[in-house]
Image (spheres, rainbow, N blue to C red):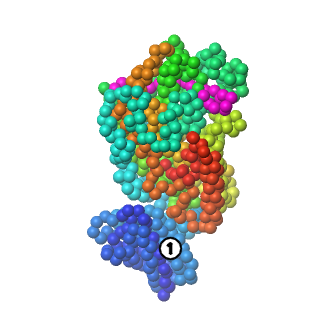
Amino acid sequence: MPSYTVTVATGTQWFAGTDDYVYLSLEGTAGCSERHLLDKPFYNDFERGAVDSYDVTVEEDLGEIQLIKIEKRKYWYQDDWYLKYITVKTPMGDYLEFPCYRWITDEKEIVLRDGRAKLARDDKIQILKQHRRKELETRQKTYRWKEWHPGFPLSIDANSHRDLPRDIQFDNEKGVDFILNYSKAMENLYINRFMHMFQSSWSDFADFERIFVRISNTISEYVMQHWKEDFMFGYQFLNGCNPVLIRRCTEIPKKLPVTMDMVECSLERNLTLEEEVKQGNIFIVDYELLDGVDANRTDPCTIQYLAAPICLLYKNLENKIVPIAIQLGQKPGPDNPIFLPSDATYDWLLAKIWVRSSDFHIHQTVTHLLRTHLVSEVFSIAMFRQLPAVHPLFKLLVPHMRFTIAINTKAREQLICECGLFDKANATGGGGHVQMVQKAMKDLTYSSLCFPEEIKAKGMESKEDIPYYYYRDDGINVWEAIKSFAEDVIHIYYESDEVVCEDVELQAFVKDIYVYGMRGVKASGFPKTIRTREKLAEYLTVIIFTTSAQHAAVNFGQYDWCSWIPNAPPTMRCPPPTEKGTVTIEQIVESLPDRGRSCWHLGAVWALSQFQENELFLGMYPDEHFVEKPVKEAMAKFRKNLDEIVNAITERNKNKKLPYYYLSPDRIPNSVAV
């Protein structure tokens, strides 16, 4: 009688093993096997990290194996089991791989196909077509869209982390408990003694050092030492944790009535302001989105304030970007002066602090939350709803969706919800952050997520004109590496543009993102369909780049750039100045966050800047969803390209006081998971 050797691999996560009854049956083109009991209680099989083998004897040859059915039946209590994969050695000596990488919960049966990626058009056998259809029907019932706030991209229909499907939950929920992590961070930073001291002001700038963890030769220490300097202020627009707002100024806006007399002493080329603009030496950052946003009113004992400044910057003869004019409101007038470097020291310093505070708010809510976290969740939900596990694009994308829905659900549960942690220290808490996302949706376009296009649209593409924009340089290199990888995979499975057009599952995936993620807004520019391999490569690059590189660029530098409180105040406790010549050091310190809010802020930026335990970085694919040699060769080429980028960045950063490493591939996690 024919005999098959079945090898079963259990995951290495905590509690991945099981003591339940486990049954297996094989289904082939010539028939089905009976259920075979592989494990029963106390046999010590299927333990965490184990690889167990069994001989399965059948009455007659089953033909080509199409499906494997696994059943788990409870012995005593619910005992979830994480199944990595199953391999089958046939009587003819052939090996078949059946990837799973899923939790088997309760008393359920799961059905696995072999690991060869297939488009719907490739399935000719009815049982495979039926399996494909049933998997998507089940997923669409499990992964449901829900509106968290009007105007937001839709998110997962779950009120808490525990409501999520087991497959997308964190392995250890405590590891991503925001309250626990923030408290631990404050304890580790030795600042927990200040965490309840709300309304208690610091004495002076030096007093902030009492909660600052001085780590020698780090960016955070350098920021603390140089934060008042104009070059440091300008540098952060290029390579800080929010390097996405600066654009070349092609015309001075009427709402910023800067004159030549105001800025003449800041210009170094003996040109007029208009001539400097024409030569491309003037840049602008406009925080108009903050205009009209309600400041946090959750604490009646502390009035908090927001501003919507406009900042004009200049590329000097050293090619450094420095500020030359700041207006703290959108409407010009006598009570909204334009602050200049030639003003009194504290006038100019407070104006820059207000810009840094506004930049922090845009960074947290728009750059970070909306444009990486919420967008990545849209990609994740659409993938689970519309792409079966056998689809090559599911296999390509699933590593880049790891824990994204889980971290966002946890954030809605604890961080950005009403009365959440975000309200404790941030001037945009208490609902302001919701208003900001709603306003920012109009600028969330497909082209703005295409990294090279967005850089070019802002007039920031020239390496000769702007030589120290490392975010741009590294981002372009990583984008190109990802795009090359996506193209390689596409050409393996899509032999022509016609095949792309005919892939109904791909088209449903794209439509889900447009309809539910972008809310069907035509102006977003998100495609409703994809008709060419070239466009598909770009689309997949947008997804992978956003979920990996873009998030890394704007997330993991938060402690470096925001731990020195005066450089990134999460709230301001006095209104913006309405006249010049009145600002004192005491007024500045009184405007900055109190001791309690400073500590919550510091705990937050520390916790958010840490990599996950067992983090998987770009190009690392330990779960072998793909089994075909051509794809594995494409992965090896991708890793080689990424290694070259790492080496180039490492070489550039040597001996730099301000190294830029956020887009080094060995520091880019595969997915949004923190």
Q: Is residue 545 left or right of residue 35?
A: right
> Which residue in the structure is indicated by mark 1?
87
Q: Is residue 61 left or right of residue 316?
A: left
The percent position of residue 205, horizontal first and vertical second, equals: 43, 29
Q: Please tell me which residue lies in front, 620 or 623.
A: 620
One can see residue 569 in this view: no
Q: Which residues are magenta?
A: 302-322
Q: Is residue 11 above or below residue 327?
A: below
Q: Kindly state the secondary structure of the residue where label 1 is placed.
A: strand
Residue placed at 57% from the left, 57% from the top? 619
- Which residue is most to the left? 76
Residue placed at 34% from the left, 34% from the top? 596
**Quarter location, residue 413:** top left
Q: Is residue 45 above or below residue 338?
A: below
One can see residue 469 in this view: yes
Q: Please tell me which residue lies in front, 448 or 350.
A: 350
Residue 403 in magenta stretch:
no
Residue placed at 51% from the left, 43% from the top? 218
The percent position of residue 518, horizontal first and vertical second, equals: 52, 41
- Which residue is most to the bottom? 1
The percent position of residue 626, horizontal first and vertical second, equals: 56, 64
Q: Please tell me which residue lies in front, 118 or 457.
A: 457
Magenta part mainly helix, strand or loop?
loop
Residue placed at 38% from the left, 43% from the top? 189
Q: Amino acid at mark 1?
A: Thr
The percent position of residue 468, horizontal first and vertical second, equals: 64, 38
Q: Please tell me which residue lies in front, 146 or 230.
A: 230
Disc tally is 1
Q: Residues within 10 Å of mark 1 (few under 14, many from 20)?
A: some
